Image (cartoon, grey):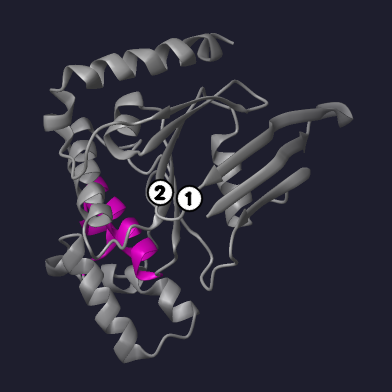
Amino acid sequence: MISITALSKTFAGPNGSAIAALGPLELTIADGEFVCIVGPSGCGKSTLLRLIAGLEAPTSGSAAVTPAPAVTPSLVFQGDSTFPWMTVNENVGYGLQVRGEPDRQRDATVARMLTLVGLTPFAEAYPYQLSGGMKQRVAIARALANDADTLLMDEPFGALDEQNRILLQNELLRIWEGETGARKTVLFVTHSIDEALVLGDRVLVMGAAPGTIKAEIKVPFARPREVYALKRDPAFGALGAEIWETLKSEVRR
């Protein structure tokens, strides 16, 4: 699980001032849980993921995945994070190569992941030959290939058009809910209330900086889910309005 205790982060500002970005924050995410975070810009959502991933050091408190995982959490960023000089095959297998995975085992894993995200015909293509949605599929496949128990996703669909966003939301649900996804623990940052309700078991609402958890909403919709079928449910709109009522004053701040 992800265990966060009294976590805070302060950055150095101009003229020696300190800028409080996050916390203090308390949070526990269970093994296999899909948790979404929404909050205003600059509230520390991305900082939180970087602290959990070990890319930033906390000012105080702790953020840990327990028990200590054999593979560090995989982080999926917003926008294009592919290596332009590598083929799709090479991009997806990069983490395994760095870990020294034997060639035969790595090739089998990459082939399985490409089948999972529907990119097998593009295995030898380069990123410039792919659409934005396909590049995000590559990023998701790379994260899954690394076989970390925890996925940290920082607005991975935020730069996509609405159609591709819906397609990839359905794709992520299919992978995570299916047996191949193995119900990894997912912490997913988004600006979209609808996206949080479509994907998550819980939605956490963060307040304006320094970010803390203002509300926790348990998502009652059964799985498996399909994006537009879910949006037709009147309860979906009502729950989205409830979250917005909690969030709007923080956005105005």
Residue 217, image quadrant: top left
User: Which quadrant is home to the C terminus?
Assistant: top right
* Picture residue at 71% right of the left edge, 49% below the top: 62
Q: Quick one: 16 or 45, which is closer to the camera? A: 45
Q: Position of residue 61 (x, y in %)?
A: 75, 45
Are the residues flagged by discs 1 and 2 in contact, CB closer than 8 Å?
yes
Left or right: where 35 falls relative to 253: left
Q: Which segment did they paint magenta?
A: 125-146
Q: Which residue is mark 2?
A: 33
Q: Which residue is mark 1?
A: 30
Q: Look at the image and tell me whether residue 84 can be seen.
A: no
Q: Quick one: 105 or 164, which is closer to the camera? A: 105
Say whether residue 204 is magenta: no
Residue 90 vs 2, above or below: the answer is below
Q: Quick one: 172 or 139, which is closer to the camera? A: 172
Q: Position of residue 225 (x, y in %)?
A: 18, 40
Say whether residue 141 is magenta: yes
At label 2, which amino acid type do we have? Glu
Is disc 1 placed on a helix, strand or loop?
loop
